[in-house]
Amino acid sequence: MLDRTGWGDAVTEFSSRNGFAPFHSDMGGGWWEVEAGFTGDIDRNRFIYANVGYQVGFDDDRRSWEANLGLRANW
């Protein structure tokens, strides 16, 4: 459940054995990010893809890495 209680004040609740557990996030402020990736043909209908990304917040110590690797098939 996502509850918008104000601008940039999202609260998500996860259900657990002990009831709902709130998860707060602060999406305020600015950041920059860079991503790179590729897709390669295995054959006519199968492909492999990969990408990597990095994000940094301007006004605090927020940093994150992202990576994806996968196969895609068309039929």
Image: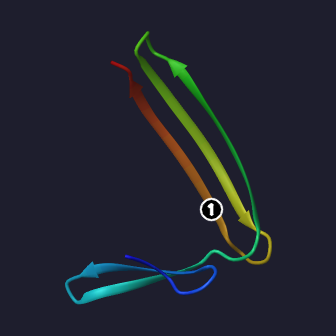
* Whether residue 12 is situated above or below residue 33 in the rendered picture: below
Q: Residue at x 34, y 85 (%)?
A: 21
Check the image and name the residue furthest to the top. 44
Q: Nearer the viewer, residue 26 or 41?
A: 26
Query: Which residue is more in the foreground, 52 or 2?
Result: 2
- Name the quadrant of the N terminus: bottom left
Mark 1: few/some/many CA within 10 Å (<14, 14-19, 20+): few
Q: Mark 1 belongs to which amino acid?
A: Ser
Q: Nearer the viewer, residue 70 or 23?
A: 23
Q: Residue at x 24, y 88 (%)?
A: 19
Residue 58, image x, y percentages: 80, 70
Mark 1, residue position: 64
Residue 61 point in image, percent of width and height: 71, 75
Q: Quadrant of the C terminus?
A: top left
In the foreground, 27 or 58: 27
Q: Residue at x 45, y 15 (%)?
A: 42
Asked which secondary structure carries label 1, the reply is strand
Of all residues, the one furthest to the right in this rendering is 58
In the displayed orientation, state which residue is furthest to the left.
17
All told, the count of numbered labels is 1
Query: Residue 65 vs residue 58: left or right?
Result: left
**The image quarter in which residue 20 lies:** bottom left
In x, y percent, where is residue 57?
Answer: 74, 69
**Left or right position of 11 against 60:** left
Relative to 32, 14 lies left or right: left
Asked which colour scheme the image uses, the reply is rainbow
Residue at 67 percent of width and 66 percent of height: 63
- Quadrant of res 74: top left
